[in-house]
Image (cartoon, rainbow, N blue to C red):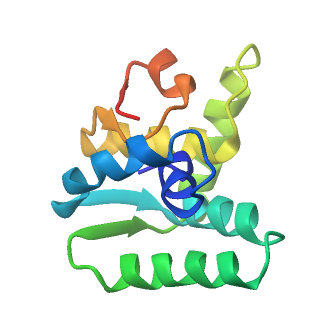
Amino acid sequence: MDSAYYIAILLKTDDLHERALQLSPITDGPTVTTDGVCMEVLAHVSDRGPHLRALGLRLFDGLRADANVTIVRQTPELFDAGIELYRERPDKGYSLTDCISMLVCRERGIVDVLTHDRHFEQEGFSILL
């Protein structure tokens, strides 16, 4: 699960909001995200007022409490590996969070990513949003 999906869920004005809502049932099974994604989403809503900040926090409180959701924590090793992938792709616009998410997906055999970010396609993943 990428930040694009969570942002689309939270923001009714997001162009992908309706599509994200349609895809929500696929999130009922086991899903994986990273704490970096959580940070991106909370940063995105941080200056959009108390209501959206509260919705963002409620979303992640719910994710942490959901037994079907794994939030991969950033370790020094994962961070360093993310920096290496970032370094290896100077011609790409990948964020460090994207690089870390891509590594997590590879490590876990995940090929379908709930995002609209074409960077994931460039690395061989299927994007669902």
Residue located 68% across and 43% down the image: 96
Which corner quadrant of the image does residue 50 belong to?
Answer: bottom right
> Which of these two is toward me, 75 or 41?
41
Which corner quadrant of the image does residue 114 belong to?
Answer: top left
> Which of these two is toward me, 7 or 78?
7
Left or right of 21? Residue 51 is right
The location of residue 9, given as percent across then percent down, is 48, 58
The image shows a total of numbered marks equal to 0
Residue located 43% across and 45% down the image: 18
The location of residue 66, given as percent across then percent down, is 27, 79
Residue located 33% across and 57% down the image: 32
Left or right of 61? Residue 11 is right
Q: Is residue 67 above or below residue 26?
A: below
Left or right of 13? Residue 48 is right
The location of residue 112, given as percent across then percent down, is 29, 34
Residue located 57% across and 57% down the image: 12
* Residue extending furthest toward the left: 29
The location of residue 21, given as percent across then percent down, is 36, 52
| The C terminus - image quarter | top left
Q: Is residue 54 above or below residue 87?
A: below
Left or right of 13? Residue 50 is right
